Amino acid sequence: MKFYSTNNSQHKVSLREAVLKGLAPDGGLYLPEQIPVLPKSFIGSLSEQSNVSMALTVARNLLGGEVEEKELQRIVEQTVFFDVPVVEVENNVYSLELFHGPTLAFKDFGARFMASLLGYFSKSEKEEITVLVATSGDTGSAVAHGFHKVPGVRVFVLYPSGKVSDLQEKQFTTLGDNITALEIDGTFDDCQRLVKTAFQDAELKSKLVLTSANSINIARLIPQSFYYFFTLAQLGLKEPVVFSIPSGNFGNLTGGILAWKMGLPIYQFIASTNVNDIVPCYLDNGKFNPRPSIQTISNAMDVGNPSNFARMLTLFHDDYYEMTQMIKGYSFTDEETREGMRAVDKQSGYTLDPHGAVGYLGLKKYQTSHSVKGVFLETAHPGKFREVVEETLGRKIELPERLNNLITRQKKSIEMSSTFDEFREFLLKY
């Protein structure tokens, strides 16, 4: 299997190069040149299979023999070892809980898969690999924990100062060793810009083995398709199912599109965002207008120029009509998000985090005109946003031990401006 750039379908590389480079030389994102349609017998027997078995089949087909079977089995087992339950919140409304991994967020899937895959490919590398990752919250912690103490790999986590929750910040600023946190004076989009620009810099590329651990890296994206299969294995295939996906950089939605293209019978996608509504606006009027992100209580979705939109366009062959038939888009304010959190807490006692709440609201809005079973992605444990959740619900919530242990730990970060020259010089001198 070869992987091509979204900017040039003729530019094709091996999986190893796509993973190690992260971004194509022309600035495009990599996609597999073929998306195999899985046999109907496989789809029909999902409920009889384990998560590892499903994930292995999906990965094997998308990677096309680029990884030895024994190694791929090991990588998948190291990725999918925790529960991924589908929980009924109310009639025809289900929460896909993606927060049962090591850092209590959905990013654990992609980060662990990529760390294992990069470790597999790096065995033949003589130089240290430098991983750059921009985070608006959970990506940083998942990547930091996934790569912590991995030999031959140095990780730099770039995050916007004052724009991630305290517990999120401590998850990736208290590890040390091969993990360095860079506290950027700016927005997530500034962090993402610094990472992307680094990959275009000739001197950096000549002196460092650079790769990215954001969802721009194909190794991060592929495992985000796994849990759509896990969901339908639990819910069955007798009724149509829609997925409402709280979205920022749109990796989760792109992963869902991959699953759908592979033959998984998904009825509809709902792109649910906060007021950073660039993609819902595109779905409404056909105009993609990136803009500076706005800070919200669902901070991991504060993205003003979502990278994976390029992949979405490519997967739909730049066909606006086809995309809008399969994806509906809605956006919600912070107050609407808080109202949704309070309503669900009162009605069912289920605790939403601010991101899952946006997904819930998108699903409910769609269901006002469509009588269909729906799933929203609950992407992080509510405890990671304790201040917002407790203030909204007017009560204390219980923190998992993994989060409680972080409260007294001291963060270690390097403060930096959002100028590329300063970032560039830092990497060259580090």
Image (cartoon, grey):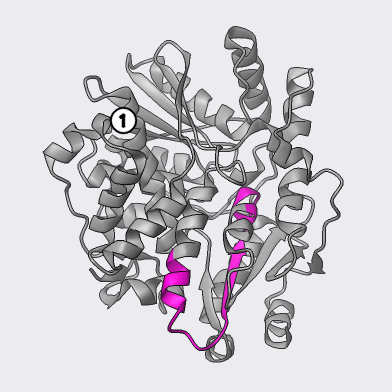
Residue 309 in view in this figure: no
Residue 305 in view in this figure: yes
Q: Is residue 118 magenta?
A: yes
Q: What residue does disc 1 label?
A: 232
Q: Position of residue 384 (x, y in %)?
A: 69, 38
Give residue 148's quadrant in the image.
bottom right
Side of 284 where 319 appears, left or right: left
**Which residue is rendered at x = 57% and y = 82% of the image?**
128
Q: Nearer the viewer, residue 10 or 386?
A: 386
Residue 429 against residue 1 in the figure, above or below: below
Give residue 230's quadrant in the image.
top left
- Range drawn in magenta: 117-141
Q: Position of residue 211 (x, y in %)?
A: 51, 73
Q: Is residue 278 magenta?
A: no
Quadrant location, the N terminus: bottom left
**Which residue is rendered at x = 64% and y = 9% of the image?**
346
Outermost residue, top side:
347
Q: Residues within 10 Å of mark 1 (few under 14, many from 20)?
A: many
Q: Position of residue 169 (x, y in %)?
A: 74, 51
Give residue 69's quadrant in the image.
bottom left
Side of 299 where 218 appears, left or right: left
**Which residue is rendered at x = 64% and y = 38% of the image?**
298
Q: Position of residue 408 (x, y in %)?
A: 87, 46
Q: Amino acid at mark 1?
A: Leu
SS class of the residue under badge 1? helix
